[in-house]
Amino acid sequence: MTMGELAFIDAIAQAELVKNKEVTPIELVNAAIERVEESNPKLNAVITPLFERARGAAASPIDGPFAGVPFLLKDFGAEYADSPLSGGSSFLAGHYVSSKNSELVNRYLKSGLIIIGKTNTPEFALMPTTEPREFGPSRNPWDITLTTGGSSGGSAAAVASGMVAAAHANDGGGSIRVPSACCGLVGLKPTRGRNTLGPEIGDAANGLLCDHVVTRSVRDSAAILDATSGPLTGDPYYPKQPEGSFLDHSFRKPGKLRIGFSSIAINGVQAHPDCIAAVKSVAKLCEELGHCVDEASPTVNGRRLFKAFGSVWAGFLCWSIKNAAMQSGRAIEEELFEPTTWRTFLHGERLNSGEYLIAVQELQKAGRDAAAFFNNYDIWLTPTLLQPPVPLGYFDYTAETRKEHIARLGEYTGFTLIANVSGQPGISLPLHWNANNLPIGVHLLGRYGDEVTLIRLAGQLERAQPWADRKPQVGG
């Protein structure tokens, strides 16, 4: 197998080559570095190369299920000792270096993954597009004029273009699933608490935020979850671990499922015709696979949900900036932040504790309403996004365009944030491409704690309608 052919096999296949001594870890790492150097000038996915450190790790004894497989960290949340962390912001860039690993990074390293760099993210992971002022926009490998999605857009662009087979991502309102949909990848948002945020953080944004990866295959996402899931002592909550491994479940049939599908988001917005076509085609495929499928949606007050989510997210952003100031010793000054970030920070500053807790209460009510849907259904099937990937600059903000900016946010990600609110697992799958050869993600929402059913169905759909042979313009 040539180094070029290695670019589009998944992480499990790469690890098997190492195990069988068909390739060495240093060869895999050097091949990944070559691909970064070739494609990154066009995509701006990797903002912090850690190449020599990765080569050193590859030349040392290494063990684990992913021994020798190159990997990237999103430059938000995950602490990797002695490496810079910026959160996509001028506020931290060049002013903060992690002193120790987060537990998630320890588990990545224990699994044998080799970190070769860090990926681009919007400032403090705020936006559903990856266009930070400090580092510039990441570009979609399928069409470089379009967004990668956000906030894990750098990771998604890197995986989609073949730089690495898998990359770290996190998700507070869709930030794993949105870029997966835009870039034609598998993006699983696990159940709340499935992957620990420790040791420094118990939860983030009252449980909205979680970490996992973007991958090309369902089995990679499942196997990496096997390597990382489980609580750290003292975590505030965690779901029950399944019987057997997530990887094993990716090959098992899900049985006959009750699936409700919809192309109308919880906020009442109708999806774009391409997204409607995607969800209807997958609903038909599910019927052909023997599942019971009908049109249905959770009953949730979308207006109150989105208003409360905005308040909690503003509180999270305010905390993120104040926490970053505390860690870096920097003073918080308006000129160090993008206008959208600063406006959201001020919103968080104005919230009093009672208003914040009322917003939390509203989200918990919405989460209960969403969970009630699963008394009658096993899966809620929707498009991941309300539109195909949009042009770069689509979410640009000025004081004059504030209303249009807010409307565009709601008209793009209306399906994803309910999973963060309820804590339920959701997965975006690349099961459809439109007439312009752009990926259109399809989203499956499952019961709290039940990644197994999602992974089984996702694996079944991948086998029935595989996507591994599809290659983007850049990297393919």
Image (tube, helix red, strand yellow):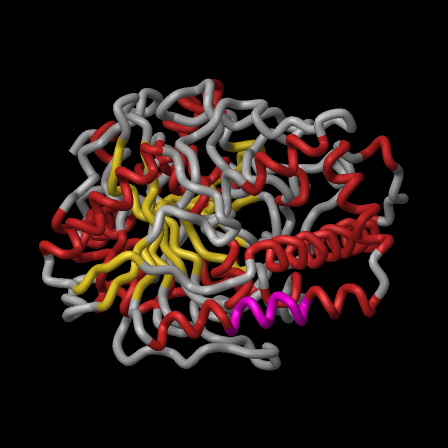
Q: Position of residue 299 (x, y in %)?
A: 46, 64
Q: Position of residue 77 (x, y in %)?
A: 61, 53
Quick check: 449 left or right of 76? left
Looking at the image, which residue is at 22% across and 48% down? 282
Looking at the image, which residue is at 55% across and 39% down? 128
Q: Is residue 85 visible?
A: no
**Residue 137, picture quadrant:** top right
Of the pair 354 and 133, the residue shown nearer to us:
354
Q: Position of residue 443 (x, y in %)?
A: 35, 51
Of the pair 389 and 305, the residue shown nearer to us:
305
Looking at the image, which residue is at 34% across and 38% down? 275
Quick check: 18 left or right of 382? left
Q: Is residue 12 magenta?
A: no
**Residue segment shown in magenta:** 360-368
Q: Is residue 367 magenta?
A: yes
**Residue 327, picture quadrant:** bottom right
| Figure quadrant of the N terminus | top left
Q: Position of residue 202 (x, y in %)?
A: 64, 71
From the viewer's perspective, is residue 69 above or below residue 197?
A: above
Number of disc labels? 0
| Figure quadrant of the C terminus | top left
Q: Is residue 272 visible?
A: yes
Quick check: 35 left or right of 419? left
